[in-house]
Image (cartoon, grey):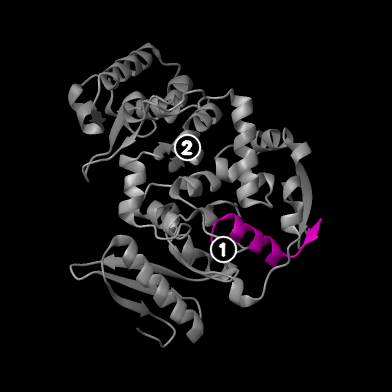
């Protein structure tokens, strides 16, 4: 199958919920196969871009009160927001992956008995109820080294096992809670690793395809040989897709949808995608949507990804917001002058960002175009 790059981009934007919105926050998390959540408001804004009427209050209600969303460490060892009913799937798929501490103990040949004892004690503490923070753990003085309590240590293993998840914190400390206290009615049946990985990869290709094996390895955070092995196991579900001369794969059942030509300009979205948006994390190489000459304006040092201005099939700039006593100021930094029509749409999107936070839009500031609202 041969398709132009614009057609592949249109397919991805539709699958990402940026053309036809998803029905709910849990549906968005399911269809996107998780939403990166290190920055709490960034995860919320990713949902806002894809679910009509989403606000920070509604997002937090789904996460902390209705608990139809759950926050866990997932692919790439990074914090993600998932649909709660998908929790067993991710445990089945990722449970066998070693944590940083487990790799360190194996590499040095250290006795791992204290580590397993600590896991037992921590699980017992959490089973008794309530939440616990890293500060609480440090004060309990039950770990031989405080590094054991870092993100790659015992807590990561408890999350990987499906024992705990992130609970609502107090602003300065992350809190963790036992699954049985958080969602006691959740059916707990993690599938076998092979079954779970198959389902996870099928969902990934559906959401972000066409893709390469390098894309899958990047998205999962695994070596390319592992990604190739897992992709080979769903070979019968795939078709080869040539995207402007680049060999990729997509789901066989998506062939008809992939054949839909890219539409005229008015049907393409104009979006303010915030930091670490799923669309920009789905594929390893970003040249399909970010102009190569502006790559370093989007991907900053230390792995930080800026908020981006998406116009049609291209990122056309970056943006940030500042919250003050009077409300929100949205600052846009286009790579090149934007049309008056796009600027009008950006003002509408900026007002939407303010509504997400439940505060007024104080100002939309657009630099490098000669325009200022």
Vertical side of 55 occupied by 194: above or below = above
The image quadrant where one finds the N terminus is: bottom right
Magenta stretch contains residue 7: yes
Q: CA distance from mark 2 to mark 1?
A: 27 Å
Q: Is residue 50 left or right of residue 246?
A: left
Q: Residue furthest right?
A: 1
Secondary structure of the residue carrying numbered label 2: loop
* Residue segment shown in magenta: 1-19
Residue at x 77%, y 53% (from the top left corner): 241
Q: Earlier in the sequence, mark 2 or mark 1?
A: 1
- Residue 74 has which mark? 2
* x and y, in percent, of residue 16 in the image: 56, 55
Residue at x 59%, y 64% (from the top left corner): 289
Q: Residue furthest bottom?
A: 370
Residue at x 79%, y 49% (from the top left corner): 240
Residue 304 shows up from this direction: no
- Mark 2: few, some, or many residues within 10 Å (few <14, many ≥20)? many
Query: 307 and 342: which one is in front?
Result: 342
Residue at x 36%, y 50% (from the top left corner): 59
- Residue 19 has which mark? 1
Q: Is residue 169 left or right of residue 155?
A: left
* x and y, in percent, of residue 66 in the image: 34, 40
Query: 61 and 197: which one is in front?
Result: 61
* x and y, in percent, of residue 327 in the image: 24, 69
């Amino acid at each position: 199958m041969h398709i132009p790059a614009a057609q592949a981009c249109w397919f991805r934007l539709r699958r990402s919920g940026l053309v036809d919105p998803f029905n709910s926050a849990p549906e968005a998390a399911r269809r996107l196969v998780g939403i990166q959540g290190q920055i709490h408001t960034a995860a919320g804004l990713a949902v806002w871009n894809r679910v009509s009427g989403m606000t920070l209050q509604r997002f937090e209600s789904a996460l902390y009160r209705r608990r139809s969303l759950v926050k866990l460490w997932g692919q790439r060892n990074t914090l993600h927001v998932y649909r709660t009913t998908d929790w067993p799937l991710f445990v089945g798929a990722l449970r066998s992956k070693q944590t940083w501490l487990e790799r360190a103990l194996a590499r040095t040949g250290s006795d791992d008995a204290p580590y397993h004892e600590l896991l037992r004690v921590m699980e017992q503490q959490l089973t008794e109820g309530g939440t616990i923070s890293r500060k609480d753990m440090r004060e309990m003085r039950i770990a031989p080294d405080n590094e054991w309590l870092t993100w790659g240590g015992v807590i990561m293993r408890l999350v990987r096992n499906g024992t705990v998840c992130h609970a609502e914190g107090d602003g300065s400390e992350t809190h963790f809670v036992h699954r049985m206290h958080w969602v006691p009615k959740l059916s707990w049946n993690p599938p076998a690793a092979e079954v779970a990985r198959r389902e996870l990869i099928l969902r990934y290709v559906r959401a972000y395809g066409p893709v390469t094996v390098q894309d899958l390895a990047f998205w999962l955070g695994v070596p390319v040989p592992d990604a190739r092995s897992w992709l080979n196991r769903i070979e019968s579900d795939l078709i080869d897709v040539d995207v402007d001369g680049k060999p990729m794969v997509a789901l066989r059942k998506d062939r008809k949808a992939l054949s839909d030509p890219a539409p005229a300009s008015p049907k393409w979205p104009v979006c303010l995608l915030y930091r670490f948006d799923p669309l920009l994390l789905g594929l390893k190489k970003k040249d399909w949507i970010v102009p190569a000459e502006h790559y370093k304006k989007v991907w900053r040092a230390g792995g930080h990804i800026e908020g981006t201005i998406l116009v049609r099939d291209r990122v056309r700039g970056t943006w940030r917001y500042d919250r003050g006593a009077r409300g929100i100021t949205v600052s846009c930094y286009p790579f090149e002058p934007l049309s008056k029509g796009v600027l009008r749409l950006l003002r509408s999107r900026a007002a939407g960002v303010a509504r997400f936070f439940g505060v007024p839009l104080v100002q939309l500031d657009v630099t490098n175009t000669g325009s200022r609202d």
